[in-house]
Amino acid sequence: MSDVVLHGGLILLILSLAVMTVVTRDTFAAITAFVVYGMLLGLAWVALGSIDVALTEAALGSGITGALLLRAAVCLRDKEAAAEVRRPGRAAHRVSGLVCAAIAAGLAAMVLMLPDPAPSLAPAVMESLPATQVKNPVTGVLLAFRAWDTFLETVVLVLALVAVWGMTPDALWGGRPGELRQHAHDGPLVFLARVLPPVGVMLGIYLFWIGADEPGGKFQGGTILAAMWMLTLLAGLTDAPPVSRRWLRAAMVAGPATFLLAGLSGVVFASGLFAYPPGFAKPVILLIEAASTVSIGVTLCLLAIGPPSRPANR
């Protein structure tokens, strides 16, 4: 009975925040509601036993996405205040509401019409999992059974960052992204920026390392590394490096490049593209995860702080 009450309350909170995110006219209130909505979705995935999905939702769906939305809101705030914003009328609201309601009803009908038990590839995955030498089925699926999709996901992050850098003025190309923040010697933010990063870096490495056998992985670990870097930038303890630095660009592409080389090596040493040599699957997967963790951490942080806005010498 207590589980029913808790789960029912969680569902009501998620639905309420979803409605608030769509209905509210205040940008920051909508973003705040979205971030809390993402955290509650993480709790919902925990209740369903999907720890990997819960970690990803909390880190990417709520954390980094919320930070990107907040930065976008700050950048647009002055422009919105200066320009006369034309808001859609009631007819547009009603049409969009009806379309969203129809989509939601269709998805609900599809779920309710599934046979019992629902079709699943889980038995086939668990049967083939020993060949990957990893114990976490999520990692096995992402790095072996659908490795091509996962590789493209890492490439998309880099392409998104390239698109953000494409908005850089010509005079500032190769400069430093973000604002120059003065270093303060005290204050809660500076204190946290000095205490949390060592713990956060160890936690990010730990999540990457255990991802092969337990819930965790490169996306969760890389997101925590990005958050720790952003914290030191916000506190003024470090400054963003110029985007022209070769080591920075190498870190960005390390994950996709390693993933691609591992996939191409499968053509020579295994049965085909993105196949792993027998007996060496786990070391190759760990190598891909390690390089991808670094790339994801660097790319997400650079995405959050935006395009270069000042010269490299400032």
Image (cartoon, grey):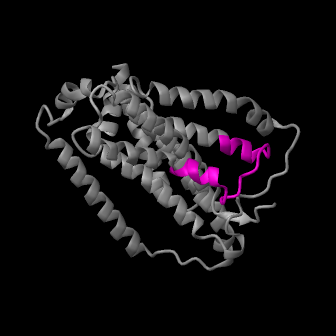
Tally the numbered discs: 0
Q: Is residue 221 left or right of residue 144?
A: right
Q: Quadrant of the C terminus?
A: bottom right
Q: Percent x, y for residue 96? A: 36, 67
Give how far across and how far down residue 237 sits, in percent: 79, 43
Q: Residue at x 56, y 43 (%)?
A: 297
In magenta, the rendered stretch is 229-253
Q: Residue at x 63, y 67 (%)?
A: 76
Q: Nearer the viewer, residue 240 or 180?
A: 240
Q: Is residue 184 left or right of residue 308?
A: right
Residue 274 place in picture, x, y as percent: 30, 43
Name the residue: 62% across, 51% down. Answer: 248
Residue that sits furthest to the right in the current view:
185
For residue 311, say whether it is visible.
yes
> Of residues 123 and 256, which is closer to you in this image?
256
- The residue lying toward the viewer, choosing from 169 and 40, is 169
Q: Quick check: is 267 in the magenta stretch?
A: no
In the image, residue 246 lies in the stretch drawn in magenta: yes
218, above or below 133, in the image: below
**Residue 235 quadrant:** top right
> Residue 175 vs residue 19: left or right?
right
Determine whether 56 is above or below 133 in the image. below
- Describe residue 246's horizontal placement relative to residue 51 as left or right: right
Q: Which residue reaches farthest top?
A: 1
